[in-house]
Image (tube, rainbow, N blue to C red):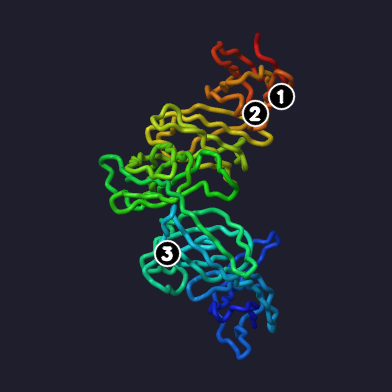
Amino acid sequence: MVVSVLTPSSDELELRPVATQVARSEDGVVEILGSRVESQERDVRGLYVWKGLPVGSYRIDLEDLQGNRWGREIVEFFGDDQFFLEIQALPIEGRIQRGADPVEDVLVWVGGLNGVERVSLRSDDEGRFGGFIPRSGRWLIDVTPAPSCDPCEGPPEDGWEGFAGGAERLDLGLFDLQPGANGVVELRLSVPGGGVSGRVALPPGVDLGPQGAHIYVHRISRVPWEGEPTFWQTRAGEEGEYSVSGVPEGDYRVYAEQMVAGRLFVSPETQVGLADTAVKDLELRLREFRSLDVTVRSGPRPVLGARVLIRPVATSIPSDWGSRTTNGLGMVHEWLPRETLQVDVLVVADNFGLIGRRVRMPETSDPLIVELFPTRGELRVPRLAGAAMVTPEGMRVGLERLEGYGVAQVEEESLVLSGLAPGKWLFCPPSRPCRTGQVLPWAAVDLDP
């Protein structure tokens, strides 16, 4: 197999194509069949040559000595083929700053740290960087601290000295990179001054350290422009210390979690508002969680694709509904605070309607069984803001949530709730006594007077 790379800068980029045998399914999914094979030689015409490859489908990755990824293409090899792969290799010049100060000795990843196409560019003591990028277009930009090696050989996944990009990645968002009249792409990057730092603490008596705990920062306020990142993460150091920088102005929720030997520890979420300064000394105290398995079935058969919502009742950690979809065994898995004694479980499934239960947490690891029945009915209730329904098994759920699940149809000033499990349901308007509605199989009924 022969590959020709069409770019005016291929020699300067020191590209090295790598071939991997693959198989493609009818729906386009690519499965890796063999190991990566570099070309055995480069002939006098500059063509890359592989010898002795079996016929079949191959993925050709264009890489360089620093682990940059310049392009990827799937080709069909029939035994004596030449393929032409083209990249633009556009020159780029840029500068990265925080306010008026340069950000020096960082890697600017055009395409993101984990992109299929990605190029890393190292900033100098003035925050300037330059080189080439594969093509024009929209690109994700990540920034990480630079490793000790300069230049580095091989991809960072192979272990660059002093590199911890996975723990200290800053996502700057999407940028439309186009060359100017001189053919050069110019990129100016501004790193926001907001951030969060502090330490992660574990419960007393837990015989493990906080090192490696994951810290997550999620934006909860509106994103001002399309492509701006909404999520940051890092990992705690040896003493539980952490720092997340480069976060734009806005409101955020911050929490930490750590999995050790099958035990999950999660901190309560803390909401912070950031401007162009950092929040310091924010302690994230981990608490142990426990797992709950729920199996949804109808008779002896598991129910695939049922939506299962689980919420702990009366714990010291505020919790919203956790949403999962059952697998082929009719099962979902959820983590809940260890002190959870009761849970609300709401199940919505096609052809089975809706059922809700408030149950005690199992004392063993046995799954909680939710039985669905094909018989169901309808109930008409007033459409009132803040009203809720209580299921026959004592679980409370708001009318607005039922509307979102597609089981409530609006009829003038009423709601018709369909697909309900037979039994006695309660309609509870705000600040008024609850009223009873007896749902009957295959019948549409109104609330009792």
Q: Which residue is mark 1?
A: 410
Q: In the shown orientation, is residue 256 left or right of residue 207?
A: right
Does residue 17 appear anywhere in the picture?
yes
- Residue 435 drawn above or below residue 11: above
Q: Position of residue 34 (x, y in %)?
A: 56, 73
Q: Which residue is mark 2?
A: 403
SS label for mark 3: loop
Q: How many neighbours does mark 2 have within 10 angstroms: few (below 14), some (14-19), or many (20 or more)?
A: some
Q: How many neighbours does mark 1 have within 10 angstroms: few (below 14), some (14-19), or many (20 or more)?
A: few
Q: Amino acid at mark 1?
A: Val
Q: How many neighbours does mark 3 have within 10 angstroms: few (below 14), some (14-19), or many (20 or more)?
A: some
Q: Position of residue 351 (x, y in %)?
A: 69, 35
Q: Which residue is mark 3?
A: 126
Q: Amino acid at mark 3?
A: Glu
- Which of the two discs, 2 and 3, sits closer to the camera? 3
Q: In percent of the image, x 46 and y 73: which residue is there?
A: 154
Q: CA distance from mark 2 to mark 1?
A: 9 Å
Residue nearest the observer in this picture, 98 or 16: 98
Q: Quadrant of the C terminus?
A: top right
